[in-house]
Image (cartoon, helix red, strand yellow):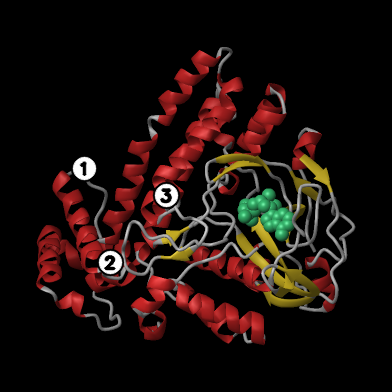
Amino acid sequence: MFNFKDTYRQLPATLFTESNPQQATNPKVLVFNSALATFLNLKHIPETDELAAILSGTKLLPNAVPIATAYAGHQFGHFTKLGDGRAILLGEHLTNTNQRFDIQLKGSGRTVYSRGGDGKATVKAMLREYLMSECMYALGVPTTRSLAVVTTDDDVRREEWHKGAVLTRVAASHVRVGTFEYVRYFGDAQHLQLLCDYVIQRHYPQLQAQPNKALVLLEAVIESQASLISEWMRVGFIHGVMNTDNTSICGETIDYGPCAFLNAYKLDTVYSSIDEQGRYAFGNQANIIFWNLVRFAESLLPIIADTEKKAIDLANGVLQTFQARYQQQFYTKMFSKIGMAYSTDEADKVLINDLLSWMEQVGADYTNTFLAIEGISIPTDERYNSTAFLAWHQRWQKRLGDSIHSKDVKMRLRSANPLVIPRAHLVEEALNKAANYHDLELFNTLIQQVQQSDSTLVNLQFMTPPDTTFENNYATFCGT
Ligand code: AMP
Ligand code: MG
């Protein structure tokens, strides 16, 4: 089924532990992503018990040498030793165009890194990751993907008993900032260099000939994370738990826990119940990624230069470029959202900033505001008839002039602005129906609606924000 050609196991043995998934009781395929299976050119496999056995880790493929990877991380600012406590890397699948993807089972039982945990996952949590990651993919945001959710008859105890499940996650790799932190604090400089070389070869091969690989890797990761966070800001995504172990080196969104999409535009929006300080609030995501990148730089210091002082100077020089890179990425996407190309004109930035301020002031819906600008029919909202909005709209029309009807403007608007996002109230309803009643209709429809690129085929129900009672009381839980 998979064409496993593993490379990670060539790294020093401290970085992983060979480890088989646990046997699951009565695994059954609940969702299978055949489009992704086709993309990966997996041989057609019917959704049988055999498939469920493979994707729950119960039946091991003959060519698989599964491992759990070691990593550390700063969680809410505090350094901890972690590792795959409830995930197993089955192997690296090579497609027929030589693209390499990690195939990871999440929720397949304990590993040496599990600490007190059971290594398992609930159906709802795994369906959430499946749904959110596939929606992010549909919206054009770099992300890990989901191949399947398989349920088991193994009970999982959280606050209450839940049904267990295993998610098959597909990622460009699972190397995290936390992987580097692990080697920095529990390994040596030689191991660090090997990991650095490995990541460059796998994700940034264009940097292979550079004399200071660690420094150029730092720069490349700064750039890819600046781009990723600006994409989150483009679509209104709040990750919710941006710990350094959840920051992927290749620039994919990873680990969908207490994440959610923004309804009304509000920079201090926090949905995660454990984020009491608002550390991971919507508008703080760029600051936090910078904080994480500083941790990344710190872990690279021993291989950036031969003295710490020199290494710090070099690293700081690169870190200082983050703000400018992020601003450029952010405004490029924001300009796109109003049909414009990137501009260095302050007046143009003011046009964007004024729109954002207006949204925040009146509590306008982030997604629908841009659709209103574009002229796509959205659920009725009096705010778009207000003098303030109409005045902004006129300024915008004047700024674009005749080009407003051009193909370029239309294309930018259409590619930057989602028609439908997976709104939390619908996500919750879809997950409850799927997990509790085995009713996947809303779950599937929601993904299809987010994938829909024709505005006339979008159902208004999926564009309607929740009422304020929902919005004010909504909290997401890690719910592992
Ligand atoms: P996450 O919140 O999914 O990013 O996980 C943070 C850390 O906790 C990782 O090292 C996970 O492997 C570990 N972890 C989360 N849930 C469990 C669980 N049920 N059993 C064991 N380890 C877990
Ligand atoms: Mg994690």
Residue 391 % position (x, y): 9, 67
Q: Which disc number belongs to residue 285?
A: 3
Name the image quarter holding residue 123.
bottom right
Q: Tell me where residue 373 appears, x and y as whole percent.
A: 22, 70
Distance from mark 2 CB to nearest ligand 2 atom below 8 Å: no
Residue pictured at 25% horizontal, 62% vertical:
360
Alpha carbon separation for disc pair 3 and 1: 23 Å
Comparing labels 2 and 1, the label whose residue is closer to the camera: 1
Q: Amino acid at mark 1?
A: Thr
Left or right, residue 339 beside residue 282: left
Is residue 231 toward the left or the right of residue 358 in the image?
right
Q: Nearer the viewer, residue 176 or 194?
A: 176
Which residue corresponds to the image point at 28% horizontal and 81% vertical from the top-left?
A: 377
Residue furthest right in the image? 62
Q: Residues within 10 Å of mark 3 (few under 14, many from 20)?
A: many
- Looking at the image, residue 86 sits to the left or right of residue 313; the answer is right
**Mark before the other along the chain sequence, 3 or 1:** 3
Residue ID for mark 2: 410
- Judge whether 171 appears above or below 9 on screen: below
Q: Earlier in the sequence, mark 3 or mark 2?
A: 3
Residue 326 appears anywhere in the view: yes
Give residue 291's position: percent from left, percent from top: 46, 38
Q: Amino acid at mark 3?
A: Gln
